[in-house]
Amino acid sequence: MKRPLIVLVVSALLLGLAWLLPHSQFGVEVQTPTSAIVSSPEKTVVEQESPSPTLDPLSQDIEASYGNVSFVIPVGLAMSVDGASMPASAGPLNPSPAFIRFALKGYQFEYPDSPSHPQVRVYPADEYAALSGWAAESLRRLQSMLDNPYTPVTNDSLPNVPYMGSSAQLFGAQVKQLPFKNGNGVRMISSYAQYPAPVSQRSSFYHYEGLTQDGKYVVVVEMPVVLPVYADESNPGENGITYVQQDWSLMGPYYQSVTDLLNNASPDGFNPMLSRLDGLVQSITVGDVSTSAESPCATPAAGAQLLTDIEDGYCMLYPEAYSTTVPHYIVINPINAPGDMPGDAWVSIDVEKAVGRTADQVANVQIASVGPGFNISRFTVPVDNEQAVVVDGLPGQDSNRKVFIVHGDNLYTFSFAPWQPSPAGAGQSTPLEDLYTMIVQSLHFLP
């Protein structure tokens, strides 16, 4: 009986000692979910409070559908997607029929100064080939590869992005025939430039050219990627390749070495992994696509032409006698000679990121930067539901009228020069004044 008594006494002493010491030495914090106590005459119930669900757009696939085109964007690639009918363009730089375009928003692998944009386009094949020589050649190459899948692949035999125009496809790597729901095509990693450019880590993109089974529609997919290996000025000799810009005729070995380097890289080393982009392509379905939907752009009357810039997101009318062969210019009586005078008069169109600025703020900064002593005037006009700020009298190489418009994330600046309006009461406006009026009245921003 003594031993149980001794154990009992020792236990009581230890318990008392514990209470004499600071509690924090023995404290254990137990976290429990927030609870709500609900009482009733019969019983008390402790109900666990469920956390509010949050929906992350990057945590699930995104189903894209517009017209009769649909596909699935794999989880994590983008935040959203906009589909739209794009108007036909008859301009010399990028002619095309009306088509459907999907623009991916919040694409996780797009970067500043990206050479490409995350998008999917669907064109009527025959109409596109009839309007654009680049499209016709790309379609010919694509059909040849699909008909002869074992033909050796070279950059000269690969289809090109038809709307890249005169830019050259520098190389094609990781080439693979890849079917979609109702068609087939070829995917690759490409880079484009108008000079013998290096292949940098962020200068290339995933490129897909496909054709529906009935041959009616061309599918073009363009997605920026980050390369796992590359060779430019920043890493000479790192991968056994050193970039030295030379004439086009001497650049073949360099581009072939880069092609071999990328072909030997794992498709999972690209960012995003090529299998994820392949999954997007394989989910594409193209039905009887209707491109006859009402165009958001103005319909040209006799003597007018429609200018459409898909990448910068606008369309407008201009007199068909004027020239648009110089990118981002409409020129009256063009001068085909060296120099900085494109013609008798012109409008130049610059597009940049607004970075939170309004058109009014941009105009204020421009006016303030030149200081006092100039006869500067300003007024506002509505342009496609936006408030444009028009400024006359800013100093420059020529007298000019500038129109500042902010739409979405972009700042559009239209510079009309030399701005020499006809005298009041003259009864007839100058050609440049007429061009200004036509643009302001017809300018429309694309989705």
Image (tube, rainbow, N blue to C red):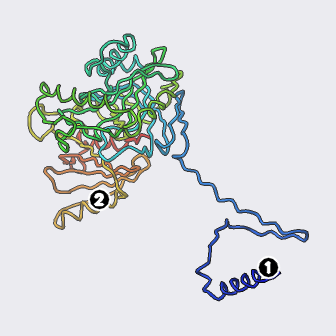
Amino acid type for the residue under numbered disc 2: Ala
In the picture as drawn, the residue positioned furthest to the front comes out as: 2
| Residue 238 location, quadrant | top left
Q: Is residue 366 above or below residue 349?
A: below
Q: Position of residue 170 (x, y in %)?
A: 24, 29
> How many neighbours does mark 2 have within 10 angstroms: few (below 14), some (14-19), or many (20 or more)?
some
Say which residue label 1 marks. 4
Residue tagged 2: 363
- Looking at the image, which residue sits at the far bottom? 20
Residue beneath the point at 19% across and 46% down:
417
Q: Quadrant of the N terminus?
A: bottom right
Amino acid under label 1?
Pro
- Residue 29 shows in the view: yes
Q: Position of residue 90 (x, y in %)?
A: 33, 26
53 left or right of 144 in image? right
Q: SS of the residue at dot 1?
A: helix
Left or right for 61, reference 109: right
Q: Residue furthest left?
A: 338
Left or right position of 9 against 293: right
**How dense is the environment of label 1, judged by Cα within 10 Å: few (below 14), some, or many (20 and up)?**
few
Report how far apart the C-alphas of labels 2 and 1 lie in the structure: 94 Å
Q: Nearer the viewer, residue 111 or 167?
A: 111
**Numbered disc in front, either 2 or 1:** 1
- Relative depth, front residue between 261 and 426: 261
Q: Residue at x 32, y 16 (%)?
A: 141
How many numbered marks are there?
Answer: 2
Image x and y of residue 234, in percent: 19, 45
Residue occupying the point 36% across, 49% down: 410
Q: Which mark is residue 308?
A: none
